[in-house]
Amino acid sequence: MEFGQVPRAIRKNRVKSWEIFDDGLHSLDKAKVDQLAKISKSRDVSYSIHGPICDLNLASLNSEISPLVVRRMERSLRNAALLGAKTWVLHPGTHGALSWVHPGEDWKVNRSNMERLQILGQKLGVEVAIENISAEYAVLGRVKDFLRLYREWPQAPDMTLDVGHSHVKKQTEEYLEKLNGRIRHVHLHDNKGDVDTHLAVGSGTIRWRKFLKALLETGFDGDLVIESVKSPFASLERVKRLLRSL
């Protein structure tokens, strides 16, 4: 939907916590931030912000492009702070055309840029959370990648576990088993286990009762964010029912 429909959707719904995707039609600017801030005050609504992702590679080896990528993300973080968001979701970088020429270099660039964003987030009072992404060329796309990150950089930001993405990689149980102490934020949407399609919860092959039970058993007490493109509110009600039944 156009951004103009977003404030109306928030006002007419009882949901009190919303994730704003700072990209595309919903890219944040002063006018949008002002609108959302007014709703937050009048409706006691809180936000998390999903950082921008379109054509932005945090691990880019192009020295001209990389600073532009970081500046775009820094602007998003600052807007998150203006909205009082407690979480800002970061998509890590991807391997590119020069990765094979300079093996390991994009890992270093990705980490350096994440460090810079984490420092800014700490100054602004916004927690950065690194999302696992499903693309095969992701620098941080599998459990082993996050284990390496936290081994090499113990102070790294905690995770946003995207269940749809981990389902495509067939690693959801492994994330819960090996990284449960690092999961602070969770994205919920469904798929058939092959492609990241952001289906309604219950429309794919994820075993939701099993997942939610296992997640709660880890002691997780962060936000569960519905990211279904279709039927998001039906997905929300389904998750609520499942949680009540556990």
Image: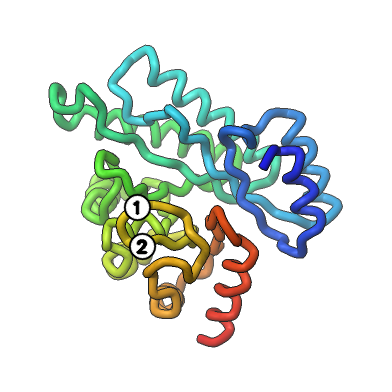
Q: Is residue 110 above or below residue 213?
A: above
Q: Where on the picture, by quarter, is residue 124? A: top right
* Tag 2 secondary structure: loop
Q: Residue at x 21, y 27 (%)?
A: 105
Residue type highlighted by circle 2: Lys
State the quadrant of the N terminus: top right
Tag 2 and tag 1, C-beta contact below 8 Å: yes
Q: Is residue 90 above or below residue 18?
A: above
* Viewer-nearest residue: 169 or 143: 169
Q: Where on the picture, by quarter, is residue 23? A: top right
Q: Residues within 10 Å of mark 2 (few under 14, many from 20)?
A: some
Q: Residue at x 21, y 53 (%)?
A: 144
Instruction: State the CA–CA distance, disc 2 to disc 1.
Output: 7 Å
* Viewer-nearest residue: 37 or 195: 195
Q: Position of residue 197 (x, y in %)?
A: 43, 53
Q: Where on the picture, by quarter, is residue 238? A: bottom right
Q: Position of residue 80 (x, y in %)?
A: 63, 40
Residue type highlighted by circle 1: Val
* The furthest residue to the top: 64
Q: Residue at x 58, y 83 (%)?
A: 244
Q: Position of residue 185 (x, y in %)?
A: 49, 58
Q: Is residue 37 above or below residue 218?
A: above
- Total numbered labels: 2
- Position of 79 with respect to 188 (left or right) is right
Q: Which residue is mark 2?
A: 192
Q: Residues within 10 Å of mark 1 (few under 14, many from 20)?
A: some
- Position of 227 with respect to 107 (left or right) is right
* The furthest residue to the bottom: 245
Q: Which residue is mark 1?
A: 195
